Image (spheres, rainbow, N blue to C red):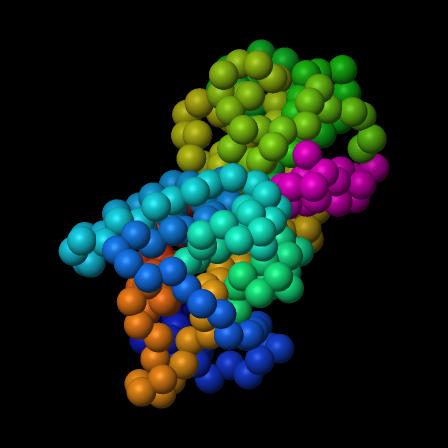
Amino acid sequence: MRRTAAAAAAALLLLPAGCGWGGTDGDGDEGTTLTVLAASSLTDVFEELAADFEAEHEGVDVELVFGSSTDLAEQAADGAPVDVLATADRESMTIAVEAGAIGNYGPFASNELVLVTPDANPAGITSLDDLDGATWVRCADEAPCGKVAVAVLAANDFDAEPASLEEDARTTLDKVVAGEADAALVYASDARSAGDDVTTVRIPGSAQHRATYLIGTPTVMVADEDASPGGGELLAQEFLLLVLGETGRAVLADAGFGLP
């Protein structure tokens, strides 16, 4: 079910700390540039939402930085500018929260691991078993997509070694699109973004190991108008509500994401 932005805001404001959304107060960046750090698998979704946001906020520039969730969270924890952080797992978000870089956070989407091959599928890969002896790749263990891959492979009793471990979901996908690998383990949303360039193969049991995405801002959202943050903090929370609202839900669904 899709929520409107108003409903999402109400849920965010009323949910008690420790039950999803919650955290500690922090300072957000002010000005006309909104810095958004997001997992690479969110590239298409956030580029579309950023364009919508800029169209509705004259003079505001949304600066998007994509990469591995773990790397981005560590950058935020080390003091890199961040108004909004979106990660592909809870562990990465926790890094930024415990460092005080993020105070307001919670789940907003989910994703499932799939197997992709080049469109012509020259290696004839139709299942995980066909990867044995083929050139295949997956995300590095420390990346959220790598953690999910390890869990899915273990659940299928598959222990063959990949040809390489990639930095994030998009670089993993690029190996197949560029013809440098026979197959790759990526998120369903990444497979959809590649369109006709890849063939998608479902993996048994992958639904039981779905990735949960979290989004957060430095400052806790408040219901009291007199205590509301201003400037960049308010813009960050408006972007957050765009993602949580009806528009964000629709864009996420079209890109292949599920609910958290």
Residue name at image x 29 percent, y 67 percent: 231
Q: Is residue 243 left or right of residue 67?
A: left
Residue name at image x 56 percent, y 73 percent: 23
**Residue 153 forms part of the magenta stretch:** yes
Q: Where residue 43 sits: x, y (%)?
A: 42, 41
Q: Is residue 102 above or below residue 172?
A: below
Q: Magenta stretch?
A: 140-157
Residue 6 shows in the view: yes
Q: Main secondary structure of the magenta part?
A: helix
Q: Where residue 167 sits: x, y (%)?
A: 61, 32
Q: Nearer the viewer, residue 228 or 69?
A: 228
Q: Where residue 7 sits: x, y (%)?
A: 36, 76
Q: Nearer the viewer, residue 60 or 131?
A: 60
- Report the residue that reaches farthest toward the front: 79
Q: Which picture quadrant has residue 134?
A: top right
Q: Nearer the viewer, residue 202 or 89?
A: 89
**Residue 108 forms part of the magenta stretch:** no
Q: Where residue 59 sits: x, y (%)?
A: 18, 53
